[in-house]
Amino acid sequence: MSDIACQLSFVRSMLPGGVTLVAVSKTHPAEAIREAYDAGHRVFGESRPQELREKHEALPKDIEWHMIGHLQTNKIKYIAPFVALIHSVDSARLAEAIQREAAKCGRTLEILLEIRVAEEETKTGWDMAGLMEYVRTAPFA
């Protein structure tokens, strides 16, 4: 059993039922992801859209890809045809751009909204009041 397979087995044994393990594969080569795939893992997360697209093209098509980390609107087109979940939608502008790109592909994309809870200026995400207003209006109404 490979090192990757051993690590996956260990981590899986520690998780409670109903938890989905997203293996963060950013910066790792497709060969390492393939080892995890061969060990039975199917859910992977990437933070760079171009790298995500390249790995999607090189690896089996039953992998469930997640976009993790910040996503720029001009990079959505690289992942919209196949990504299963976008983890960090931090603005109305990004949500609407995702919706437009998904429509071009005939898809509806699942997203997670990022809420800024820290008071630090460097942190991204919706402030709670802005998010609640957007959810009551706009496309969510």
Image: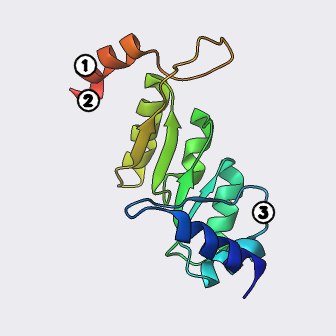
Q: Which mark is residue 106?
A: none
Image position of 83 with respect to 94: above or below: below
Task: Measure the alpha-carbon separation of dots 2 and 1.
Answer: 6 Å
Q: How many residues crowd around disc 1 within 10 Å: few (fewer than 14), some, or many (20 or more)?
A: few
Counting residues from the start of the chain, the first of labels 1 and 3 encountered is 3
For mark 3, what is the residue? 28
Left or right: 139 in relation to 130: left
Q: Position of residue 129 (x, y in %)?
A: 37, 11
Image position of 21 with respect to 31: above or below: above
Task: Measure the alpha-carbon separation of dots 2 and 3.
Answer: 36 Å
Q: Residue furthest bottom?
A: 1
For mark 1, what is the residue? 137
Q: How many residues crowd around disc 3 within 10 Å: few (fewer than 14), some, or many (20 or more)?
A: few
Q: Residue at x 51, y 27 (%)?
A: 90
Left or right: 138 in relation to 127: left
Task: Measure the alpha-carbon separation of dots 1 and 3.
Answer: 41 Å
Name the image quarter holding the N terminus.
Answer: bottom right
Left or right: 130 in relation to 73: left
Q: Position of residue 66 (x, y in %)?
A: 54, 54
Q: Position of residue 116 (x, y in %)?
A: 52, 21
Q: Residue furthest left?
A: 141
Badge 2 vs badge 1, beta-carbon distance below 8 Å: yes
For mark 2, what is the residue? 140
Counting residues from the start of the chain, the first of labels 2 and 3 encountered is 3
Discs 1/3, front: 3
Q: Secondary structure at mark 3?
A: loop
Q: Secondary structure at mark 1?
A: loop
Image position of 35 with respect to 118: above or below: below
Q: Identify residue type, mark 3.
A: His
